[in-house]
Image (cartoon, rainbow, N blue to C red):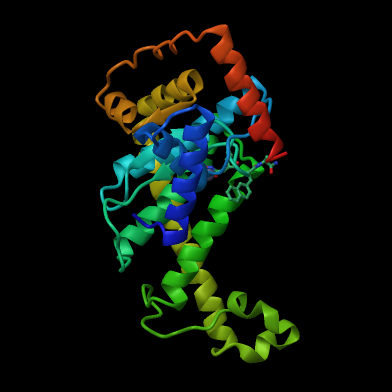
Amino acid sequence: PGMSGADLENVVNEAALLAAREDHSMITMEDLERAKDKIVMGAERKIIISDEEKKIIAYHEAGHTMIQELIPEIDNTHMVTIVSRGRALGVTYSLPAEDMYLYARKRCLGDITGLLGGQAAEKIVFDELTSGASNDIERATDLARRMVCDWGMSELGPISLGSKDEEVFLGREIVQSRNHSDQTALKIDQEVRGIIDSCRNRAETLLQQNIDILHAMSNALLEFETLDRDQLDRLFRGEKLEPEEMPEPVSSDEEQRIARADSLSMKGFL
Ligand code: NHX
Ligand code: ZN
């Protein structure tokens, strides 16, 4: 759900490349899953990260995942990883159950809370904040501003409020192009701040109330690096996760072929 036709085309293309690389005569479901992850989350990036930073990343992603699990109105986490993908050091990826065309206020507030859950976990566990949350903060602020200015979801009511942000390209004319008074601008900022503050409080409260699961999930992430929906279900039921199944042994011939194919595919990206 949520993908465009072009996204789907990319996924199928990527799956075909993966299948060909492994000499399959057909595209398997596994190829499609890996292709989808790459299109949605970006290509895996092999970088070396200190144990200390890995721990911060694990708690940050665990924070998002916990909130997505604890707030019923929003989508659960489909997959969470501390393997670097695209521009991100870690990714929490949720999947809507079906395509949706309307965005309910509760859901919006839930999503903002989820976005702030990463940094909230960092703050609770390490009593410190890092710069990594920039994209989360940008998205949360953007959503809050749209609730106030576009969607009539604040005390200011259903008035369309042109915000500066959308008209940056006008440069100096920003002030004239605003369709509201300075007083209203102040009220917008206050409403946005109010939404962010209450969502941040909610995130911190939820995480503090479930700190044991937060620790368990962060530990599981450090051990397994990526958790899928099945593993998350087991974690939330309080079960221990079995160690990863060993990959099937490959012949040295096979190994060399895969290594060759991988180095070829890397050249395309570096
Ligand atoms: C940096 N990257 O720029 C390093 C390499 C907090 C564990 N010094 O929130 O990776 O800090 O939940 C799209 C997508 C900027 C645009 C991700 C722009 C990431 C991602 C900065 C995880 N996951 N932050 C996150 C992260 C970073 C960044 C992005 C973007 C971290 C965080 C990036
Ligand atoms: Zn984040």
User: Which residue corresponds to the image point at 46% horizontal and 65% vertical from the top-left?
Assistant: 144
**Which picture quadrant has residue 174?**
bottom right
The residue sitting at the front extreme is 25
- Count of numbered circles on the image: 0
Q: Quadrant of the C terminus?
A: top right
Residue 62 makes an appearance in the image: no
Of 203 and 46, nearer the camera is 46
Residue 180 appears left or right of 74: right
Relative to 204, 163 lies left or right: right
**Residue 12 visible in the picture:** yes
* Left or right side of 119 for 269: right
Identify the residue shown where x is 56% and y is 32%: 57
Q: Residue at x 54, y 51 (%)?
A: 136
* Residue lying at 43% horizontally and 77% vertically, measured from the top left: 150
Question: Quadrant of the rendered structure where residue 203 is?
Answer: top left
Locate residue 134, reporting x and y percent.
Answer: 61, 50
Give whichever of 264, 93 is nearer the camera: 264
Image location (x, y in percent) of residue 78: 36, 40
Q: Quadrant of residue 28?
A: top left
**The N terminus is located in which quarter?**
bottom left
Q: Is residue 29 above or below residue 171?
A: above
Residue 212 point in image, percent of width and height: 37, 25
Question: As rendered, which of 31 and 79 lies closer to the eye?
Answer: 31
Image height of 157 relative to 200, above or below: below
Residue 110 lies, in percent from the top left, at 36, 54
User: Would residue 215 appear left or right of 232 to someone viewing this image?
Assistant: right
